[in-house]
Structures are given as structure tokens and as C-alpha cells.
Amino acid sequence: MANHLYDGLLKGRETDSRTLLEVPGERSWSYAELVAVSAQLANLLLAQGVRPGDRIAVQVQKSVEAIALYLATVRAGAVFLPLNNAYTRSEVCYFLDDAEPAMFVCSSERKAEFDGIESRLFSLDGDGGGDLMQAAQAHATEFDNVAREAQDLAAILYTSGTTGLSKGAMLSHDNLLSNALTLVDYWHFNSDDVLLHALPIFHTHGLFVATNIILVAGASMIFLTRFDVDRMIEQMPHSNTLMGVPTFYTRLLADARFDRDLVAHMRLFVSGSAPMLAETHIEFEQRTGHRILERYGMTETNMNTSNPYTGERRVGSVGFALPGVDIKISDPETGAELAAGETGMIEVRGPNVFLGYWRKPEKTALELRDDGYFISGDLGKIDADGYVHILGREKDLIISGGYNIYPKQIESEIDTLDGVLESAVFGIAHADLGEAVAAAVVPVAGTELDPEELIRALEPALARFKLPRKLYLLDELPRNAMGKVQKNILRDKYA
């Protein structure tokens, strides 16, 4: 295996004229063109004094040039640090202070906000405009990659920071490349595949899973700047694979044009970044004849498990540990490994597991064991057949009157009730019990629900201590950019 991430992704593609990226309505980019632009950008980075290990922070719109900048960064031996476009100036400044990047790239319209920062400041816009690409055009289209070892840093991704300040997960060249190689094999990707890419690229899903897989496989992708149902349906006939979050699939199912004929040629639908409701799985299969492949990953590890490509894709499960990855369930208090079927902490070990948290050795020591296992913070179980099930985050565990209550079980029961679209269960302070169960419920459009009737409907299915004491009706659940429900917002709102 190549030590250098770029070598593993694009080595030998300098003259490859095949299409890598197609931006509908604009233009197509060949492998050779992307290699050349990434070389110009890498030369620019060196000319600007960027050295191996320096961080390049990027908060830009999705574009082919942004992908080229990612590749240029690792070619120059630097560390790519993508930031969510929604972050405010104060949030971005936290990351800049923490990571101390040599360069910060943002959109032209926001550049004035960051005048005076210590990092070199450049702009890059969604249409490829901005002074970064202007400066890059003066540089050569050839570049000798700066030597890097497998364990050298390639990227830093900051966690979402739902509790406390965000931590920078340090990902090595080997972390990213090994995971891409595994997934290409596990999901049967090859050079004939065309991925419909509508994910953001500031997150591991859109950048390190979707994009890296296509580069390794020598495949191509239709590159949409964002998810839009009309564009997705328009481009579906020209692609054969899709990676998305559950929201992608629920919105496609809400459109009558999304039917069996439209997707008859499709090979693979993958979902991740947030749990998918069983009802969505079932409706999708009934509508299209395809069963969505659900998998499990996280910022610190990329992908850990996947339902099988061939074999049973089990609804409610995220499948088996990927080849080379070890998964175990441990007692959250003692760390002792638990037996099959028991609920506990999911721990992960493998070449995909990150190096630790940037400049936070004490946090690293708390979550990364000496034997290489990462304490994920996710609660789950492994069933008798080896399928992994995610039951919630440790911080979402509710302890009421001394009983451990796992929100996923209650959510699953609520979601089966007539008129319920989805739900989120969380704990609120209770003077007597310590915590009490609360639930936020989104009704099906046009349906009127009564909170007390819903609670009574749960009585046959749940022990009394698991029943919600408060049930709130909402138009929608609060979610982050990748579709994960933000229970911390619900806890704060109803505290």
C-alpha cells in the first residue's frame, strides 16, 4: 500500500483523459485536469511558505476547485482542515486559534470578516473564482509530492461539539487510504461506476468516503453543489450509485417521480451519518425494489461497519465490522467486554482509527485505549448473527430512578404509532428520579396528535419507568448539517 494518500488516490492519472467529475450545466473534469490543477495549487502552497505538517483551513462552497485544494494540500505534505460553511466568524476563529493554520481559504464575500488573522488569507468561490485560483494559475502543472509516511497527518476534522468545545480529530494518510481501499472492495466499486454526489465536502462522508472511493476506483461522479430533489431526479438516469443521509431518501420518496423505473439501472444506495427509520427502509424497498445499504462511521474513524453488499441488509442494523476493523461492546463503567446481545459501549480498533485529538492529550487518553481501541461514545449491541446495532449516544443515556434507559427502544415504539413521522427521546431533570423521559414527536403532515393519548398508547409496549412523562409535538426535529438529530438542543429547550 502507498504511504502517501495522494499516491493511493491518483498516482498515474496525469494523462488520464477519462471523466472524473461532471458538474451538470457547466463542464466535465478529467482525471488529468484535476491532477494538473492540484499541482498548481500545491506549487502555490510551497511558494507561500507552507511546510509539511502545516494546516490549511478551508471554509468554502462545494466546488471541483475545493477538491483540487484538498488534493494539493496532501501533495504538499500539509494537513487539510475543512470547516462547515454554516460556522459564524466567532466559531471559525475558535478553530483558527486552536489549529493555527498557515493558510485560511474562505469565500470572497466573507474575506473581509477575517482581515487581520495571522494565517495567510485567500478566497475561493463556488464558481472557482477568488484570488486563490488566480494565484495558482501562475504555477506549473507538475509537482513532485512531498514525502509523507503512513502515520503522518493528512487531515484534521473537528467534531460537532454538541457538548463542550469541538475537538480536532487527527487523521493520518493511512487512516484515510486504508478505509477507502476497504470500501472500494466491500461495496464492489470499479471504473464503470458513476456516483451521484450531493453531499457536502466539509464532512467525512462527502469527502473522505464518497470522493476518496471514486478516486481509488478510477470511477466518476456527477457533482451537485447541494441536494435538490429536481436535480437528483434529473441526474439519476446518468448515475448508478448514490451515497446519502436519511433525509435524502425521505425527500426522494416524497416525490412521485421517484419510482421503480427511474432507478431500475441503479446498483447501490448507501445511507449513513444518521440513523434511518425502519419505515423509510421498508417504503424505499417497496417503491424501488432496492434495499438501502446502511453503514456506521464517525469523524474519528471514518467507516467502521457496513451491511453486506451481498447477503441480508438487516433493517435497524449497521451490519458487520469491516475487514481489518475490530468491534467490541464493553461495560461503560469497567471497560470489560460484554457478551453478544448485551448493550454497552461500542469500541473500535483498526487502521481507520484516528491518531488522537489535536493538542488535547488528556482527551485522547480518555477515549483511546493503550491497546488501540477507541471508545466511540455510542451505545449498542452485537446480535447473535454478528450484526451491530446502534442504540444511541452515551450522553443520551437516561438514568431514571437508578434504571438505565436507552432512547432508541422508546423511539422505535413511538415511531410505530399511527400519525407519527419520527421522534427523539431525551432526558430532562426530575427532582425525585434524577432524570425523566421526555419525547419530541413530529406528526405526519396533516395529522393531529394528542400527547396524552400517545403516551397511553405506549403502555402495552414499555415498562412504566420508560414511559415519557413529557411529550412535545414539533414541526421538525433539530438537526445538524449531516442530518443528525441534535438532542442537546432539545434538552436545553425543555430543561
Image (tube, rainbow, N blue to C red):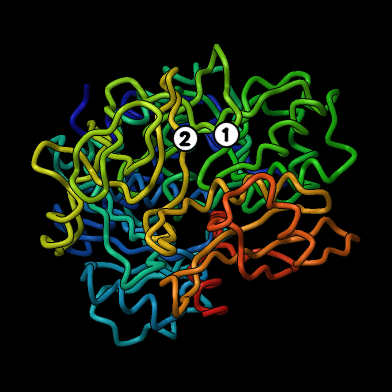
CA neighbours of label 1 inside 10 A, class few (<14), some (14 to 19), many (20+): some
Q: Amino acid at mark 1?
A: Gly
At label 2, counting other C-alpha atoms closer than 10 Å, the crowd grade (few under 14, some 14-19, many 20 or more) is many
Query: Relative to residue 371, is residue 62 drawn left or right?
Result: right
Q: Quadrant of the N terminus?
A: top left
The image shows residue 96 at horizontal and vertical percentages of: 28, 73
Q: Is residue 281 above or below residue 452?
A: above
Circles 2, 1 touching at the beta carbon (< 8 Å): yes
Measuring from the top left, give residue 251's x and y in whole percent. 76, 48
Horizontally, residue 294 falls left or right of residue 247, namely left
Secondary structure at badge 2 equals: strand
Give the camera-side residue of 276 and 199.
276
- Give the residue number, with chain letter if any, for mark 1: 316
Above or below for 365 versus 237: below
Given the current orientation, which residue lies at the most extreme top position? 311
The spot of residue 124 in percent (x, y) is: 47, 64
Which is nearer the N-term, disc 2 or disc 1?
1
Residue 94 shows which numbered tag? none
Task: Name the residue: 40% across, 61% down.
Answer: 399
Q: Out of 237 and 102, give the one closest to the viewer.
A: 237
Per the image, the residue denoted by label 2 is 389
Q: Quadrant of residue 446?
A: bottom right
Q: Position of residue 179 (x, y in %)?
A: 33, 31
Quadrant in the rendering for residue 243: top right
**Residue at the spot x=23%, y=80% of the render?**
118
Q: Is residue 285 visible?
A: yes
Q: As displayed, is residue 128 above or below residue 71?
A: below
Q: Residue at x 77, y 48 (%)?
A: 417
Residue drawn at 74 percent across, 26 percent down:
285
From this view, report whether residue 314 is shown above or below residue 210: above
